[in-house]
Image (cartoon, grey):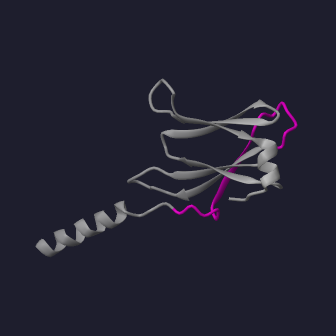
Amino acid sequence: MRHCNLIMVSLLLFSCSVQPDYSKDNYWLTRKIDNNLDNNLYCEVYLVYQGGVWGGDVCTVYLTDSTSFRMYLGKELDHEQIRVSLIDRETALVHKVNIEGRKLKTIYKKQYNIPLLKKEGKFE
């Protein structure tokens, strides 16, 4: 009996320590940013960890124009969401919000200069 308990505790600790995989192998969806403008900016979302019964899914989100750059914005959990909007044609505003309950709570805000991202040409 003691041996069985030790095995169960070991399996539980192992399952809790599994780290999400941040690869871009498991594409999930693409969201176009601001359909009213002809800006060709998108959020690409990749499912990197499926929690199943014991935990929630983890997704990573990237800002991209599909040809010049791909910028890592962060990860989303079940109760968090990354939202991107345009301030003007050259500036994207990224909000990470907690969506639990009735009120949205901002976790962080950050601005990105689109022409600078295109000029740097990084693909993260």
Picture mark count: 0
On the picture, is 71 further left or further right than 97? right
Q: Main secondary structure of the magenta part?
A: loop
Q: Residue at x 83, y 43 (%)?
A: 40
Q: Seen from this angle, which residue lies furthest right?
A: 38
Instruction: Tell me which corner region of the image, top left, top right, bottom left or bottom right, holds residue 90.
Output: top right
Q: Residue at x 55, y 59 (%)?
A: 48
Q: Which residues are drawn in magenta?
A: 21-40
Q: Seen from this angle, which residue lies furthest left?
A: 2
Q: Is residue 65 visible?
A: no
Q: Quadrant of the C terminus?
A: bottom right
**Residue 98 or 118: which is nearer the viewer?**
118
Is 113 within the magenta? no
Q: Is residue 54 visible?
A: yes
Q: Is residue 12 above or below residue 74?
A: below
**Residue 72 or 28: which is nearer the viewer?**
72
Is 39 within the magenta? yes
Q: Seen from this angle, which residue lies furthest bottom?
A: 3
Residue 111 at x, y percent in the picture: 67, 37
Residue 20 at x, y percent in the picture: 49, 60
Residue 107 at x, y percent in the picture: 51, 35
Q: Residue at x 49, y 43 (%)?
A: 78
Instruction: Tell me which corner region of the image, top left, top right, bottom left or bottom right, holds residue 4.
Output: bottom left
Q: Seen from this angle, which residue lies furthest top?
A: 102
Residue 34 at x, y percent in the picture: 77, 34
Q: Quadrant of the N terminus?
A: bottom left
